[in-house]
Image (cartoon, helix red, strand yellow):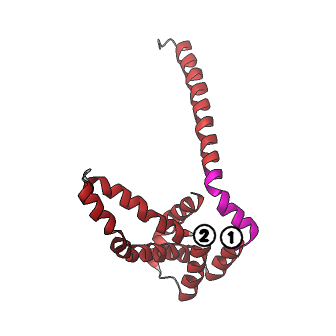
Amino acid sequence: MLRSVMVIVVLLFSAGAAEAQTPSPEAMSAARALVTTLKLPDQYKALLPVILLGIKPALVQDRPEIEQDYNLLMPAIADAYTPYFNSMVDAAATVYASAFTADELREIEAFYRGPTGQKLLQNSHAITEQVAQVGRDGGRKAADDLRMRLTEALRQKGHKL
């Protein structure tokens, strides 16, 4: 999840830069190594079953004969996904290569290859969920308190709430 957030943040801040310049081959090479270390290709491969599960009910329509043929088509469909997969990996590498120099990319990749980076990658989803929950809980508590304070202040000004 954290990796996805990082990719989105990089996309948002580098969209203009990506259009203005094409990354160097050296930066692209370093970015591809980083993308691999971040295990983004694994995430993109994991999208295929999710996509197929989403498509299946509309096509199969609870008809066993269609479901059987649908299941037989899976290997060919997996091959049809390859260009999309490759495009996503290349696009992710381009995002990173547009936002960082080749040397910076190598530094980032070295961090993620190390034990601390690997630990961050392994725990990033759980950490992101916990941090998001902290935000939700804190926001809810703040909203309740602020609503109460504002209600009282508005009542003191003579408003009926």
Magenta stretch in the rendered image: 112-128
> Is 128 drawn above or below residue 99 in the view shown?
above
Q: Residue at x 27, y 55 (%)?
A: 64
Residue 115 lies in the magenta-colored region: yes
Q: Quadrant of the N terminus?
A: bottom right
Disc 1: which residue: 112
Disc 2: which residue: 38
In this view, the residue in front, 89 or 21, is 89
- The picture places residue 137, in percent across and down from the top left corner, at 61, 35
First in sequence: mark 1 vs mark 2: 2
> Is 158 drawn above or below residue 119 in the view shown?
above
Residue 116 lies in the magenta-colored region: yes
Circle 2 crowding by C-alpha within 10 Å: few under 14, some 14–19, many from 20: some
Could you say whether the residue bearing mark 2 is in a helix, strand or loop? Answer: loop
Q: Is residue 16 left or right of residue 99?
A: left
Name the residue at the bottom extreme: 25
Mark 2 residue type:
Leu
Q: Are marks 1 and 2 in contact (CB under 8 Å)?
A: yes
